[in-house]
Image: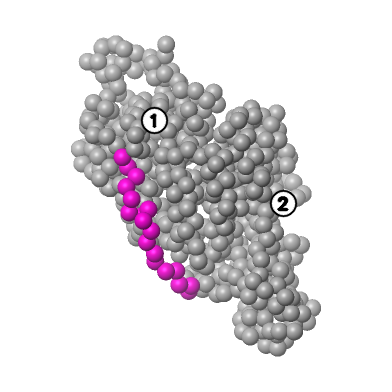
Amino acid sequence: MKIQPRDKRALLRAALGEIKSDLAIKNVQLVNVITGEIYPASVYVYDGFISHVEYKEPGREEQFAKEVVDGQGKYLIPGLIDAHEHIESSMMTPRNFAKAVIPKGTTTVITDPHEIGNVWGIEGVRYMHEASEGLPMRQLIDIPSCVPAVPGLEHAGAEFGPAQIEELAKLERVVGLAEVMDYLDVIHGGDRMMDIIRTAEEHGLYLQGHAPFVEGRMLSAYLCGGPNTCHESRTAEEALEKMRSGMRVDARDSSITKNVEAIWSGVKDFRFFDNFCLCTDDREADDILHNGHINDVVRAAIRYGMEPVAAIKSATLNSAREAGLQNLGAVAPGYAADMLLVDDLRELTPSHVFYAGKLVAQEGRLLAEIEDKSYPLESANSVHVRKLAAEDFTIHPPVSQGKVKVNLMKYYDMNLSTTDIVCEEVWVKDGRIDISGDQDLKFVAVVNRYEGNDNIALGLVRGFGTKTGALASTVSHDSHNLTIVYDNPEEALMAAEELARTGGGMCAVKEGKILHTLALPLAGLMSLKPAEELAEDSAVMKDANRALGLTNMENPLLRIVTLALPVIPDAKMSDMGLVQVTAKRIVPLFPE
């Protein structure tokens, strides 16, 4: 895709100096991500595009431009591009998200709205598209490919197939097919994913991948199937093999998972890094406000040893090329005039942010006006659970006393979402499973929250981290059913009823009292609050989660959100039961 000027002939005349450009930024050290050089230059802009870069004879800016900005010797770099992002994971609307990230230097995000797509289907994706129109940044959309993530193992609020891809491909600003998570269906040539991929290819969309721990011939098959990117690499060895195989690796630094250090250690000795990109995937509001957005991921890459210009290229030109954006991600004639002025390439805190040649933020403050708008979907209820009772959260084993074998989920690391299925013996008392003597063992429930489906699946989880109480969330990737980890059924019921009342969100209960509720009424995923207010609310929610025992982890708010994601190996819960991810099957709670 190429971003087209409104009047190409006028742009040509500005390039030739026959008419004045709108803007010249003089006295800068230009970071050229195409050649890897840094040199003095003046950059001219006409109607949102770079018309000329002068490095041979600077000094006549007033002659050729209507407005001149003195860069004061600062570095001029391309506007930053997030290669893979779920805006819903910020818990902000697209407009509030823009207000938060633009001052950090983000001028483009490649966003996958599959979170809201799982809740509201096409209507949800259309909302994200409509709510992001007219912003002083680019929110480019990849069409959700896997709604639900794995059919037959979970139920979401919608299902996407070729017809939905066909319809959404007609929208402006759609550039790709979002992360193809059902990697096993791709590898084995399943009809569902083959049809979806074919439809996307017919519309010229690039194919974004998702291939955790896929290697060897399985990786080759996945690449032959079409997707050629992956943000799910977690180890040096995994990233090395994927890049050697021609895959584009998006090194992730999210609010949940931080993989940049491990990935860079595996690929740092390569000579070329054109297939190396940076992404946030999932960053929440307070993380963005306090640490940054994609600029913070670039900082991380530099901190772990990447050369600054190469790191900047990984969040500009490389990300643009990955998404097939021909004239975005560099400061060169004909490219979109998205640029940042920064004092320090390692810190990457922009003093000036230009989008389409307009100054939209300065010294951390948004200058561009973003009008507050409301949309019907923002007031629609998405949490439809039947009348519940404590008994709905009670597991009755096949024996009334003694011990019984159960299959359960087991976590091994407080900062990783990967799990295994293990078989253990647990105590039974009066016909109910009794976990009172094992603080590391908890009940887990996944309650379907969509109209026409009353599924409730119960199970057990070890190593989740809570020591007491109940923790509930409707942010539960990717089907976003109501997920609860708890000690006793009464507190699970209390948490479930609270989130049904608020229209979704997160809730912590301890000793029969609600510690805090983070209300997320938009699709049960997002708040309507601006970033600053949401960050304060989420900070209180984090403290509540810590009060339940989630103290030994980087982000206690997000521990629960991947518990039900059946594309991250190898054990997850869904509204249908315990899922063995790599085998694509439901495992019975009680072994046969």
The residue mark sitting in front, 2 or 1, is 1
- Residue at 48% in and 50% down: 125
Tag shown at residue 527: none
Tell me the amino acid under the disc marked 1. Asp
| Of the pair 102 and 438, the residue shown nearer to us | 102
Q: Is residue 191 above or below residue 355?
A: above
Q: Main secondary structure of the magenta part?
A: loop
| Of the pair 289 and 141, the residue shown nearer to us | 141
Q: Position of residue 336 (x, y in %)?
A: 65, 67
Mark 1 surroundings: few (<14), some (14-19) or many (≥20) residues within 10 A: many
Give the residues drawn in magenta, as a range: 367-384
- Residue at 61% in and 29% down: 190
* Residue, disc 1: 575
Q: Is residue 241 magenta?
A: no
Alpha-carbon distance for marks 2 and 1?
41 Å
In the structure shown, which secondary structural element does the residue marked by tag 1 occupy? loop
Q: Is residue 565 visible?
A: yes
Q: Position of residue 543 (x, y in %)?
A: 32, 48
Q: Is residue 347 visible?
A: no
| Of the pair 423 and 184, the residue shown nearer to us | 184
Tell me the amino acid under the disc marked 2. Asp
Q: Quadrant of the C terminus?
A: top left
Tag shown at residue 274: 2
Instruction: Decide if residue 541 is on the left or right side of residue 277.
Output: left
Q: Is residue 374 above or below residue 491?
A: below
Q: Position of residue 167 (x, y in %)?
A: 54, 48
Residue 145, quarter of picture? top right
